Image (cartoon, rainbow, N blue to C red):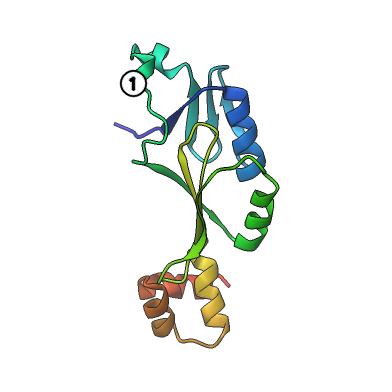
Amino acid sequence: MKYQCSLLAVNDIEVSKKFYGELFDQKVVLDLGKNVTFSGGFAIQEDFAWLTGLNPDTVVKKSHNMELYFEADDFDKFIEKLKSYKDVEYVHQPLKYEWKQRVVRIYDPDKHIIEVGEAMEVIARRYLDEGYSVEEVSKIIQHPIEFVEECKRSE
C-alpha cells in the first residue's frame, strides 16, 4: 500500500486554488475540475459530501482536529505577505515556542487550520552563526545533535 495525499473538503475550488497558490506558493500538479492536487502533496475537493455520499450537514467547519503545516525560510517575509490578505482569519498571531520556532496559525477559506512555522534549519543556522556549539544549539532548539550537525554541513 502507498500513501497518496491528504485531501481537504472545500466549498469553492477556485477560491481555494487561489488562496493556496498565492499565499503558499503551491503549484497545481493535477486539476480535475472539482479535485485539485498541489505540489506540496495535498489535494482539495469541491462537493466532498456528494462524492462520498455523506449528508452535507455532517461536513463540519472549524473541526480543530488537524492542520496543514508549512515552513518558511524567511518567516518575516511570509508574515508581511500574510498581512496583505485582509480577509484571513487568525487562529493566533505569530508566537515563539520554547524551542525558538516562530509560528502563526490561520484558517483557510473553508476554516481548515494552516500552520506556518519558521524553518528549523534556519533557526539552527542562526544560533550556529552566533557562535553557539552544535551541542548548545541542539539543547536550545530541542532537536537532535544529528539534525544540527546536518544544518551546519548544509550552510
Quarter of the image that includes the C terminus:
bottom right
- 112 lies above or below 32: below
- 43 lies above or below 155: above
**Residue pictured at 42% horizontal, 73% vertical:** 141
Q: Amino acid at mark 1?
A: Thr
- 66 lies above or below 100: above
Quarter of the image that includes the N terminus:
top left
Whole-percent x, y for residue 89 in the image: 55, 43
Residue extending farthest to the left is 1
Q: Is residue 31 left or right of residue 151?
A: right
Viewer can see residue 74:
no
In this view, the residue in front, 147 or 74, is 74
**Residue pictured at 49% horizontal, 30% vertical:** 43
Q: Mark 1 sits on what residue?
A: 58
The tally of labels here is 1
Residue extending farthest to the right is 84
Whole-percent x, y for residue 63 in the image: 36, 36
**Residue pictured at 39% horizontal, 77% vertical:** 138
Whole-percent x, y for residue 28 in the image: 60, 31
Q: Identify the secondary structure beneath mark 1.
A: helix
**Residue pictured at 59% horizontal, 61% vertical:** 73
Whole-percent x, y for residue 135 in the image: 39, 83
Choose top left, top right, bottom left or bottom right for residue 137. Answer: bottom left
Viewer can see residue 69:
yes
In this view, the residue in front, 40 or 69, is 69
